[in-house]
Image (cartoon, rainbow, N blue to C red):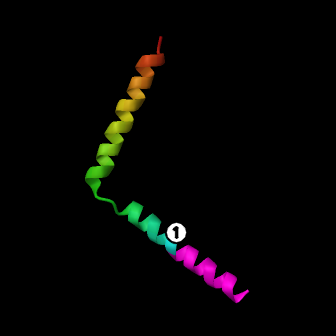
């Protein structure tokens, strides 16, 4: 039981660290991803529009 709680605590810390790393990425890469998504979605709209 003690080992299980220790493993859960370690997993919680690891997941929290990953989420914080994702949340605090530089704004430039986030903007680049958004433009890529918009370009990809407009391509799909044009492709399947008719």
Q: In the drawing, does residue 35 fall left or right of residue 20? A: left
Residue in view at x 42 percent, y 67 percent: 20
Q: In the drawing, does residue 6 fall left or right of residue 16? A: right
Predominant SS along the magenta part: helix
**Is label 1 in a helix, a strand or a loop?**
helix
Give the x, y percent position of residue 39.
Answer: 35, 31
Which quarter of the image is occupied by the N terminus? bottom right
> 4 and 29: which one is in front?
4
Residue 36, picture quadrant: top left
Residue 2, picture quadrant: bottom right
Above or below, comparing residue 20 to residue 7 in the picture: above
Residue in view at x 29 percent, y 51 percent: 29
Q: Residues within 10 Å of mark 1 (few under 14, many from 20)?
A: few
Residue in view at x 49 percent, y 71 percent: 16
Residues in magenta? 1-13
Give the x, y percent position of residue 23.
Answer: 40, 61
The residue labelled by disc 1 is 15
Q: In the drawing, does residue 10 fall left or right of residue 49? A: right
> 6 and 24: which one is in front?
6
Which residue is most to the right?
1
Which residue is most to the top?
50
> 48 and 4: which one is in front?
4
Above or below, comparing residue 35 to residue 4 in the picture: above
């Amino acid at each position: 039981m003690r080992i299980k709680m220790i493993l859960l605590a370690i997993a919680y810390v690891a997941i929290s660290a990953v989420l914080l790393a994702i949340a605090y990425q530089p704004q430039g890469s986030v903007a680049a991803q958004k433009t890529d998504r918009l370009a990809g979605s407009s391509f799909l709209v044009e492709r399947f529009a008719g």
